[in-house]
Amino acid sequence: MAYAFSLLTPEGEVFSGDVESVVVPGGAGFFGVLAGHAPMLAAVQHGILAVTTDEGRREYLIEDGVLETDGKKCLLLCDNVRDRRDDDNPVLSW
Amino acid sequence: MPSLREYDVKIASLKNTRKMTKTMQMVSASKLRRAQDAQRKAAAYANHLHDLIHRLAGSVESVAHPLLTRRDPVRKAHILLVTSDRGLCAGFNNNLIKHVAQWISEHNSDYESISMSCCGRRGNMYFRTKEDVRKEYLDTTAKPEFLKAEEIAEELGELFVNGEFDEVYLAYNVFKSALSQFPRIEKMLPIAPVEVKADESKEPFTRNYIFEPAEPELLALLLPRSVSYTIFHAMVENSAGEHGARMTAMDNATNNADSLIETNTLLRNRARQAAITTELTEIVAGAEAL
C-alpha cells in the first residue's frame, strides 16, 4: 500500500509522491516506515535513505533531520540531501 | 567645442557602457527570479519546522535549552552582518552599513563590548578597521547554502553558550520588492520565548505518538536548526535583495546612458553641421575672392 512521502530541505523539495516504504537512518538505528505506521516523530541521523516506489528503489545521502508520520503521510525535514545517483563514487564520498 | 571625432569616441564608449549595464540588468533579473524561488522553497521548510517546534512545545512541560537562556546583565553583544560580496547595486549595502553603524553608536553605552562577524565582503570592508570584527565568513552570500548557515549558527551558538557573547544580533536587508529593500537588525540569540511557545491554534501531538528520542531531546535538536534557518533566511533575503537592487540600479544606469547617448548624438550632429557650414562659407568666400 502506498502513502504520501515528502523530503524537504531548506533549499527545496527533493522528493514528493507516493511511496511503498522508506528506510531511514534513525538516531538509534535504521527503521522503516510503511503505510499505516504508528504516529511518530523521530530524529534522523546522516546516512543513506532508501525510498521504494512502484517504479523501484532510490537512495539518497542525507544529513541530520527529523521525520514525522501520522500513518497516512510522512514528512522528512533534512539539512541537506544528495541523490546517490549524482555521486561518482558514493562509497568513497561517504 | 569638441571635434566630431571626440564626440564619436564618447558615443562609442557610452554605447559600450550601456551594453554592459543592460546585460547586468538582465543577468540580475534572472538571478532575482532564482533567488525568489529559493525564498519560496525555504519558507516551505520553515513552516514545517516552526509547526513542529510549536507543537512539541505544547507537549513538553517546560522548555529549557542553553540557547533560550537570557543573561542578566547583558554585557557583550555580537552582530552578524549579512551583506553582498559585490557592489554596483546602488545603496543596497551602504544603507545597511549606515543603519548598523548608527545602531552601534546608539547602543554602545548599553554594552561593555560589541563585536561583529560578517557574511559578505562589503560589510567586512567597511567595518574591519572601525569595529571589532572577529570573523569574516567567505563565499556565503553569493549563493546561499543551508550547510554554510548551519556552520555559522553552530559556531555562534557555541560562543553564545560558552559566554563569549550574551546577545547575538542579526543585521540584514529585507527584500520587499525589486524596488525596495530595507535594513533590519533583530535579536537572534537568545531565542525569543515566543518562538517556542505552545501555539493554541496548532494541535499538540496526541498521546499515541512515538517520540524517538523523548520530546525534550527532540526539541533540543530542533532549536539549533531554527537558528540555522534564521541565518539562512537572512542570506536568502540578502541575495534576493542584492539582485533586485542591482537590477533597478542597472536599469537606471541604462536609462542614463540612453539619455547621454541621445544628447551627445545631437551635439555631434550639430558639430557636424557647424563644420559643413564653416567649410561651405570658406569655399564660397574663396570663390568670391577669385
Image: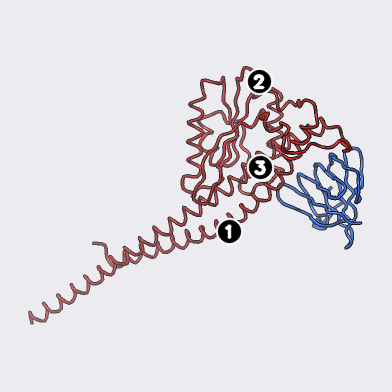
Chain colours: A blue, B red
**Which residue position holds label 2?**
B71
**Which residue position holds label 3?**
B232
Q: Is residue B63 left or right of residue B212?
A: left
Which element carries disc 2, helix, strand or loop? Answer: loop
Which element carries disc 1, helix, strand or loop? Answer: helix
Q: Pick whichever, B49 or B4, lies toward us.
A: B49
Based on the displayed image, in which of its 4 quarters is residue B263 positioned? Answer: bottom left
The quadrant of the picture occupied by the C terminus of chain B is bottom left
Asked if marks 1 and 3 fall on the same chain, the answer is yes
Based on the displayed image, in which of its 4 quarters is residue B78 positioned? Answer: top right
Q: Pick whichever, B76 or A87, lies toward us.
A: B76
Q: Is residue B230 left or right of residue A61?
A: left
Three-letter code for the amino acid on which mark 3 is drawn? Phe
Neighbor class of circle 2 (other Cα within 10 Å; few <14, some 14-19, many 20+) is few
The quadrant of the picture occupied by the N terminus of chain B is bottom left
Three-letter code for the amino acid on which mark 1 is drawn? Ser
Residue B200 in picture, x, y percent from top left: 72, 35
**Which residue position holds label 1?**
B30
Task: Specify which label sits upstream in the sequence, 1 or 3.
Answer: 1
Question: Chain letter of disc 2?
Answer: B
The residue shown at (46%, 48%) is: B90
The residue lying furthest to the left in this view is B289
Tag in front: 1 or 2? 2
Q: CA distance from mark 1 to mark 2?
A: 45 Å
The residue shown at (26%, 71%) is: B272
Task: Specify which label sits upstream in the sequence, 1 or 2.
Answer: 1
